[in-house]
Image (spheres, coloured by chain):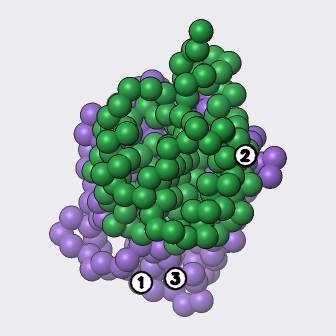
Chain colours: A purple, B green
Amino acid sequence: MKGAVATIDAALASDTMATGKYLTFFLGDEEYGIGITRVKEIIGKMPITPVPRTPLFIKGVINLRGKVIPVIDLRSRFDMEEVGYTDRTCILVVEIDTASLSILTGIVVDSVSEVLSIKKSEIEPPPAFGETRLNSDYILGLAKLEDGVKILLNVDQVLAGQEITGIEQAAKMTTD
Amino acid sequence: MQTETDLLRVVLYCRGNTETEHKLLETVRNVVPGDRISHYQDMAGISQTLATPGSKILVIVIQDSGELDAFVRIREQLQDRAIILILPDDGPEIMHRSLALYPKYISNSRTQFTDVGLVLEKIIQHRKYGGE
């Protein structure tokens, strides 16, 4: 139970976030942001080849100019309702740092919004979490802007350790 | 002379006469005297109290996404308040939507609320000793 107090201490301290540029995108009605330095490319929807024996949120792999990269569906990762891909569906190619290597990964999002410069003063720390299955490890902060809140994601934390292993396997299976 | 912190109120919102409500009310009463607690079961009541001046900490129990949407619609009234949110343990989607309320702490309704009591105490201390 001490954890609840320790985490609320962190949430009450409000100066841990840095000013930066974020690429924002939508999943359903919510707008999210990823640090622009992590985004290597934005591509439109393209054929995704399923890979057997991988977690459900791994949609498969794509061939990006000869380089095969795994693709994850962020809706599926966040247990959101599955929707069909539209003309606005995009794949963000991002670099995910794991303990041992950097993996280029595609992330399917509903639509890309814009690149925003967000000041440190506009970023609130994420809330602390109690006894719940949920956690905020992958939430870097909440950008409090005039047009609403944007959830800033720590792309390295969006996937748990075993899920990273799944991605690594998917990438490996296609390159072997 | 009473300071604003002395007049701090805890506003509890929990719809329905449920076990959750009783447990939570008991938890809050262990931290704050009963006369500093306002308890509401409907949106009109809580909306009215938010319109009145005074320092308030909100403890809000959300039972479904419709109820969360109702709070998101009045989020301007919730701005700059310390909010403890208790969500159904339904996964990340409702949690992500709840972030529009800028809660300080999120727990879930299946717990005994010991954590909520500790966090409430901490927020009150933080306000007394130089917090927001």
Q: Position of residue A120 (x, y in %)?
A: 47, 26
Horizontal side of B2 relative to B117 (left or right) equals: left
Residue at (66% x, 26% y) in the render:
B126
- Mark 1, residue position: A49
User: Amino acid type of disc 1?
Assistant: Thr
User: Amino acid type of disc 3?
Assistant: Leu
Relative to A26, residue B121 above or below: above
The foreground one among A46 and A144 is A144
- Judged from the image, the secondary structure of the residue bearing numbered disc 3 is loop
> Is the residue under label 3 in contact with that under label 2 (CB below 8 Å)?
no
- Mark 3, residue position: A56
Q: Position of residue A154 (x, y in %)?
A: 54, 49
Residue at (44% x, 52% y) in the render:
B40
Q: Viewer-nearest of labels 3 and 1?
A: 3
Numbered circle sitting on residue A64: none
Horizontal side of B44 relative to A53 (left or right) equals: left
Relative to A151, residue A116 above or below: above
